[in-house]
Amino acid sequence: MKTMVRALLVWAVAFSALAQETPVRFRILQINDVYKIEGLENGTRGGLARVRTLRTQLEADGTPLLVMHAGDALYPSVMSKFLTPAGMVATLNLLDGKPAAFDPNLIATFGNHEFDPDNAVPTLGSVAASDFRWVSSNTRYCAAPGSCNEPFSARHANVRDTLVLQLGNTKVGIFAITIPNNRAYVQMTDAQDATRLALARLKQDGARVIIALTHQTLDEDMALAERHPEIDLVIGGHEHSYIERTVGGRPVTKADADALSAVVHEVVVPEQGAAQSTFRKVVLDASVQKDATVDTEVKRWITALEKQLGPNDVVAQTTYMLEGVEPAVRGRETALGNLLADVMRAHMKTDVAFIQGGTIRINDNIPAGPIRKYDLEGVFYYPNTIVDLEMTGQQLLDALRNSVSQVDLLEGKFLQVSNIRFRYREGAAGEPRFTVDAADVEIAGKPLDLNKKYSVATIEYLYENGHKEGYALFNKANPARPALRTPMNKVENDLRTVTEAALRSVKTVTTNIEGRITRK
């Protein structure tokens, strides 16, 4: 009998040791920058109903799953502009398939656009209505001008400065960083200081795995991972296109906006040593079936939007697809960018025209066929006025160089152009990442004359704020800043009004990609 008891004790100890050595496994489903809950191209690609389907598939084998949204969950979208973010929140609340339940495994952080409204009420109300948790380590609420010392976690119970989750016998810590927004009611503290404080707190709370949930640039995400090797994964947003990098074997990832894709991470935490993870991109195209419950909710809000906007009448037809997704308008010539620049040039009767890709807000493609009123609501999410001025050939060259200097990062400063053709190349040592040679620029089919003055049509936003994105010529402190040729007229030169009138006039748009911008 004693022998049997001894054997059972040995077996129990061995089994206990084996159980302790069994690695903890969990998954992360990553999305970011979702502005159209229905997806793109009339709902045929992306959208939150397909995210729900993917989540269901990933949870089927019982492996714990965290769904992480890396910001810009509330704004900017046509839906949130006209209906407040209620539709966005209601749809996110259904990602667990349970209409009335709190979802402990959905964690979001603030994007910079979460604070687009002039006051805090819409954002705070949306957070309060969220049946999931928000994490933000560097946002502070400004109760009064100059009094910005209150964490957003103090406003709502479902907002945390940091978060620790217990997955099996492992604690997973999450902190979140957001790039600045200049609204009066919110202030972002220094990202590095906030990171150090968050990491210290997570370590004190016993986190074995640390995840940075961020809404900032890729360069900032890379620097974050390099400075802090204790961070196991950086789940990022803001760039709007799929990006993957590794820093010391640790992933830095971003998904395509509007859930055109998601990133799935498989994380293994051994008994000893650092967590190991692999990841894959999952394309959420028409081959992925929409979850019926979420799709019904999406349609309910689309119907509400239609009632708010009125008849979705056809403005014109387009022969070719007008690409408006941000990776396109911020990174290469597009038919939509050509169309807008051409309309501006024709209206102002200038030699050339250009418009920033970042001001084309539709983040969707208009397929060949009808151009509808709702499409224009997306393109012209923010109002803008066409202005005209004069620039020398050298100043135009400087603008083109700034436009492409970081084209690989798909920044909003990239210019769509009219009556200009140019080629750009990778920069040599001491130059920006990409640059333009004067010999590779043509204006109206003729070589660029660096000393000649050209009339230029552009938009008020670029003229007033372009210096913030490297267009130094437009800095009001620059003595070379050109004066406007004609006084600004926000009524007659409203870009939306002018474009819609031009479309209705031509009836059929034949603008296509023409080789205006090419890479050597």
Image: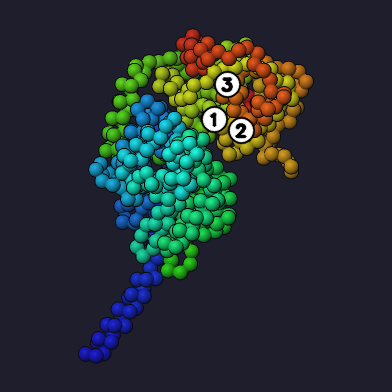
Colour pattern of the rendering = rainbow
Residue 373 in sight in this render: yes
- Reading the chain from its start, which is encountered first: label 2 or label 3? 3
**What residue sits 50% from the left and 43% below the top?**
188
Residue topped by disc 3: 459
- At horizontal 47% and vertical 42% (from top left) the residue drawn is 148
Query: Where does label 1 land, which residue?
Result: 358
Q: Residue 192: image x %, image y %?
A: 55, 51
Residue on which disc 2 sits: 469
Residues packed near mark 1 inside 10 Å, few (<14), some (14 to 19) or many (20 plus) = some
Taking the image as shown, residue 213 lies to the left or right of residue 488, namely left
**Spatial CA span between label 1 and label 3:** 12 Å
Give the amino acid type for the residue marked by disc 3 in the picture.
Ile
Q: Quadrant of residue 464?
A: top right
User: Considering only order in the chain, which callout, 3 or 1, is on the residue closer to the N terminus?
Assistant: 1
The residue drawn where x is 49% and y is 57% is 199
Q: Would you place residue 237 above or below residue 364 in this image?
A: below
Q: From the viewer's perspective, tell me whether residue 356 is left or right of residue 311.
A: right
Q: Is residue 453 left or right of residue 465?
A: right
**Residue 293, label in figure:** none
Nearest the viewer among 482 and 275 is 482
